[in-house]
Amino acid sequence: MLINCVAYQDGQKLADIPVEEISDYIEKPETFVWVALRDAQPDELSIMQQEFGLHELAVEDARRGHQRPKIEEYGDSLFVVVKTIECRDNDIAIGEVDIFVGDSYVLSARDGGSQQGFLGVRARAEKEPHMLRLGPAFVLYALMDAVVDRYFPVLDMLETELEKIEELIFSQGRQRDNIQRLYELKRKVTIVRHVVSPLMEAVGRLHGGRVPAMCQDTQEYFRDVHDHLHRISSALDTIRDTIATAIQVNLSMVAIEESEVNKRLAAWAAIFAICTAFAGVWGMNFKVMPELEWKYGYPFALSVMVGVCLYLHRRFKKAGWL
């Protein structure tokens, strides 16, 4: 579905134009066309391929979707794939934006996985005509910067969720639930990392060293995007290490709880074993045993059993076993 098709010249918006007139505008000097699509259909991509002369391999990747973040050069043009990340119902939703960039055009196609559009990016770019004069490379930066900035709320959500779990680590009886939540959080961190790491590697090719010709004047902007991705990657590493530590602590807490239970069971078993021992001795009923002929033998036996059990209970209580 077509969202926008706008022509710009020397940093200023010329007009919203129909798709059929794209080829006429891109031939004008200092002019480029910025087209935005959502859930692009194969026939729409075919039309754009004809209008802009897009490389067939890049168009094929856009049709298939589910590409890893990357930047590929096709002659004087670039094909860029970035992933969008959004928080929905305490989970992470992944979308994809495919961007075709040439000397006189920018084509962005996002799928339905991303509910947030880029109208704000276009409005921001139009308010900075001195930057828009840099051409399609600045538009590419603005789109990538908007996508990366939307990673930070997701990072904050992960950190907040980790802090909540950490507060419950030493809660009695919550260890098993905490481990399950930690593994779920680890899964989310892995998803975000699979989005950030390849994109950081790809953006690194747009500043310093050999960069595409169209990005020569915008290297510092792409370096800023790379710095943001590096910060996010470092924060993800910290969260992942903290999760690993928290899992070990929870497992230790489970082992400690089980040890406490075993000590209690051992203590009660020892107490009842005393009763069983005395009952076994006095229950043999041998005639020569003086206790059988003693008037106070039965209450004496019960008193000894209760006394020894109380003594053991006191010792175990003092030792922290009960």
Image (cartoon, rainbow, N blue to C red):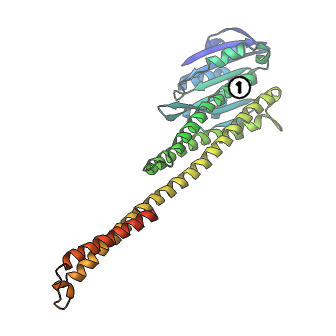
Residue depicted at x 75% and y 23%: 138
Given residues 31 and 310, the one toward you in this image is 310
**Going by the image, does 285 lie left or right of 212?**
left
Residue depicted at x 48% and y 59%: 256
Residue depicted at x 58% and y 52%: 245
Percent across and percent down for residue 107 are: 65, 23
Assign the N terminus to one quadrant of the image.
top right
Percent across and percent down for residue 104 are: 74, 20
Amino acid type at image mark 1: Leu
Assign the C terminus to one quadrant of the image.
bottom left
**Going by the image, does 38 lie left or right of 211?**
left
Given residues 286 and 180, the one toward you in this image is 286
**Label 1 SS:** helix
Residue depicted at x 19% and y 78%: 296
Which residue in the protein does label 1 denote?
A: 140
**Going by the image, does 27 lie left or right of 62?**
right
Percent across and percent down for residue 257 are: 44, 58
Q: Residues within 10 Å of mark 1 (few under 14, many from 20)?
A: many
Seen from this angle, which residue lies furthest top? 15
- Picture quadrant where residue 6 is located: top right
Can the viewer see residue 186? yes
Instruction: Work out whether 81 lies above or below 4.
Output: below
